[in-house]
Image (tube, coloured by chain):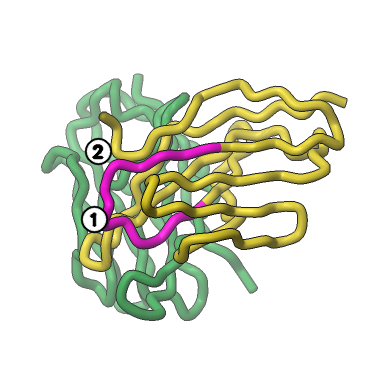
Chain colours: A green, B yellow
Amino acid sequence: DAGVTQSPTHLIKTRGQQVTLRCSPISGHKSVSWYQQVLGQGPQFIFQYYEKEERGRGNFPDRFSARQFPNYSSELNVNALLLGDSALYLCASSFVRGVGVETQYFGPGTRLLVL
Amino acid sequence: QKEVEQNSGPLSVPEGAIASLNCTYSDRVSQSFFWYRQYSGKSPELIMSIYSNGDKEDGRFTAQLNKASQYVSLLIRDSQPSDSATYLCAVNKDSGTYKYIFGTGTRLKVLA
């Protein structure tokens, strides 16, 4: 079975530009989460979507937005890029088995470099 | 105080030894706990999940959870050079939050 897929794998942008990252979850998974991981740190939660509804949002500015499509794939958009947005962006897919019981599986990530 | 704390390491162990990785968390309502392995330049890979106090074993890996003391640990028996990676501890705070809080990770080096 295919795992979580993300595109593109690498991206170089300049300050002020906008970027869209894409994620397809594992087949059968309806929940997608987005994380930002800067070098030397653990992943930081950005968003979670379940059944196309936003279920959680981390402490990121409004320049970050996301959505989930009917096929459960998801996009993360970042506007007005800053140098500090350079990071590995991870998508995680999960199957919600019950309240508080879900396990997240990560995709390979998109490495974003802002110049 | 960070919500999830790990010693950044590096933790160096000889091949064949037991590696012990520790993680503490601050929020007592945390329900689910996870260990991920991350090789340099790669994404995190799930190793273990644990939800109840006690030990959970899977092959060479054992996760230990003590909710009263708010710590979770990962033991790797018969460590191999291929185990050299950063190990991330993640905590799911409660059923309504649906987000994982990660520690900064512990870098493990297994010396051949």
Mark 2 is surrounded, within 10 Å at the Cα level, by few (under 14), some (14 to 19) or many (20 or more) other residues, namely some
Tag 2, which secondary structure?
A: loop
Instruction: Name the residue nearer the viewer: A75 or A54.
Output: A54
Q: Is residue B55 left or right of residue B60?
A: left
| Chain that bears disc 2 | A
- Say if the magenta span includes residue A17: no
Q: Residue furthest left?
A: A62
Instruction: Name the residue nearer the viewer: A92 or A96.
Output: A96
Q: Is residue B82 left or right of residue A60?
A: right
Q: Quadrant of residue B9?
A: top right
Give, as a three-letter code, the residue at label 1.
Ala
Q: Report x, y in % for residue B52.
A: 46, 65
Image quadrant containing the C terminus of chain A? top left
Which stretch appears magenta? Answer: B22-34
Q: Quadrant of residue B19?
A: top right
Mark 1 is surrounded, within 10 Å at the Cα level, by few (under 14), some (14 to 19) or many (20 or more) other residues, namely some
Q: CA distance from mark 2 to mark 1?
A: 13 Å
Q: Report x, y in % for residue A23.
A: 42, 59
Question: Which residue lies at the image location 46% right of the left edge and 25% below the top edge?
Answer: A40
The residue at which mark 1 appears reads as A66
Which disc is residue A18 wearing? Answer: 2
Q: Report x, y in % for residue B95.
A: 26, 67
Question: Which residue lies at the image location 29% right of the left edge and 42% below the top edge?
Answer: B26
Image quadrant containing the N terminus of chain A? bottom right
Looking at the image, can residue B100 be seen? yes
Give, as a three-letter code, the residue at label 2.
Gln
